[in-house]
Image (cartoon, rainbow, N blue to C red):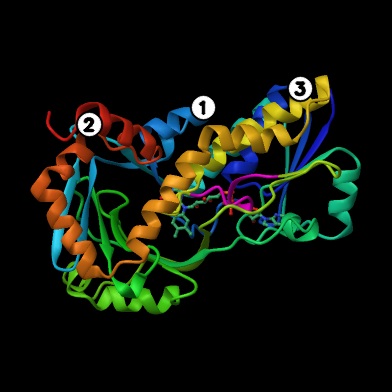
Amino acid sequence: MIGNVSIVGAGTAGLIAAKALSRHGIRTTVYDQKHRLGRPPRASGILSIKGLGSLGIEYSRAVTNTLSGARIHAGGQTVSIKSKEPIAHVLDRPELNEICREEAESAGALVITGQRISGHALDRMSGSGILIGADGAVSSVAGHFSMGPIGRHALTYKAEYEVSSNDGMVDLFFDSAYKGLFAWLCPNSNDILEVGVGVDSRYGNGKRAFEHFIRSKDVAGIIGYSKPVSEGASMIPMSMRHRIVDESRGVLLVGDAAGQVKATTGGGIIFGGNAALIAAETIKRHMEEGASLKDYEDIFSRRYGMEMALHRAISAVYSNSGPGTIGLGLRMMRTIGLDRFLGDYGDMDMPSLMIKRFFLRGLSN
Ligand SMILES: Cc1cc2nc3c(=O)[nH]c(=O)nc-3n(C[C@H](O)[C@H](O)[C@H](O)COP(=O)(O)OP(=O)(O)OC[C@H]3O[C@@H](n4cnc5c(N)ncnc54)[C@H](O)[C@@H]3O)c2cc1C
């Protein structure tokens, strides 16, 4: 063993880091306040198939559905962006967490559940090795080590209904009631439909926005009087934390704790998981060759900084436009064939690839 790492938080980011560190021969302990990891499931699990491949997880037993596109609704307009191939899986989040835990443990990591870490325990952990904060949007590690705030949050509320409505497409609804994000209908499986909303915390409240959404004709006609089989509120960090490394105290943040989330959709597993892999590689080089822990921040920013910025820019466009303007944009998309282009060349995670293809090929096939 070449050193010690403590990880606070056994979500996907913490467990992916734990597996990679253990494989590098580093003694790794992960702590989580929950007894049952990933429960209750408050988040969705729509992940691009390509992005999932980059995480190196044997995820197949968590797949509950496969999607080939999205319908976007705003201002009375609807546009379908459909790919010829499946582009995303819907994963059962507690099952995904369990797979990540099994993989981390088989690599040699110790996972301790039912233990909340704060205060002096954090100082002890950073004093006796490296400490990774993978403890989600409201990170105790970031707070304790004064690593700055996350500027923007979305408040979410979602529920699952026993409704059969699966055509392999997710529906996204843009409206001023969900300013900053959107509302969605996602077939989690053949007989479970997820209904959710996210709204920028400056403009609204997740539960209230949800009540508005389920009363709308788009949803009421589908769920009727059925009662949800699960429901709950959560929060998504929508911007990066100012600092994600404290070199002198040996502290790194990964995943939602760092704000490594796509501002367009609130999806954080792919970027957070890849950040965890970069953090593990950097810690290995730090322990073996004295490399700076700051390399983690630099490498993440080189690989994903541009993509994160593009997600923020796209999100700023729809966050600052009313539904009428977005609807007009959708009509224009259809008229010029941008919907087909996005279906053929869109990338859920890396907008720059799409832009590159646009400049190489234009909209014509
Ligand atoms: C409604 C909703 C829908 C979403 N949909 C998607 C989606 O479709 N695709 C996608 O990619 N992402 C989605 N996300 C985002 C995704 O869920 C997060 O980006 C991801 O869970 C972040 O993983 P993480 O490991 O960084 O943090 P978390 O999953 O938040 O895990 C943090 C862990 O730390 C533990 N913890 C916290 N504090 C302490 C402490 N002091 N001591 C010990 N343990 C502690 C918690 O118990 C938790 O287990 C969604 C989020 C929400 C809310």
Q: Earlier along the polypeptide chain: callout 2 or callout 1?
A: 1
Name the mark on residue 125. Answer: none
The residue that mark 3 highlights is 25
Question: Outermost residue toward the left?
Answer: 335
The answer to whether 264 is drawn above or below residue 132 in the figure is below
Mark 2 Cα-neighbour bin, 10 Å: few <14, some 14–19, many ≥20: few
Side of 199 where 80 appears, left or right: left
Magenta-drawn stretch contains 31: no
Name the mark on residue 56. Answer: 1
Three-letter residue code for mark 3: Gly
Q: Which residue is painted at 42% across and 48% down in the image?
A: 311
- Comparing 133 with 340, the one in front is 340
Q: Which residue is painted at 48% across and 45% down in the image?
A: 308
Mark 1 Cα-neighbour bin, 10 Å: few <14, some 14–19, many ≥20: few
Q: Which residue is painted at 85% across and 28% down in the image?
A: 3
The residue that mark 2 highlights is 85
Q: Earlier along the polypeptide chain: callout 3 or callout 1?
A: 3
Q: Position of residue 192 (x, y in %)?
A: 30, 56
Quarter of the picture holding the N terminus? top right
Q: Secondary structure at mark 1?
A: loop
Three-letter residue code for mark 2: Glu
The answer to whether 253 is drawn above or below residue 329 in the figure is above
Q: Position of residue 22 (x, y in %)?
A: 72, 27
Q: Which residues are magenta?
A: 253-261
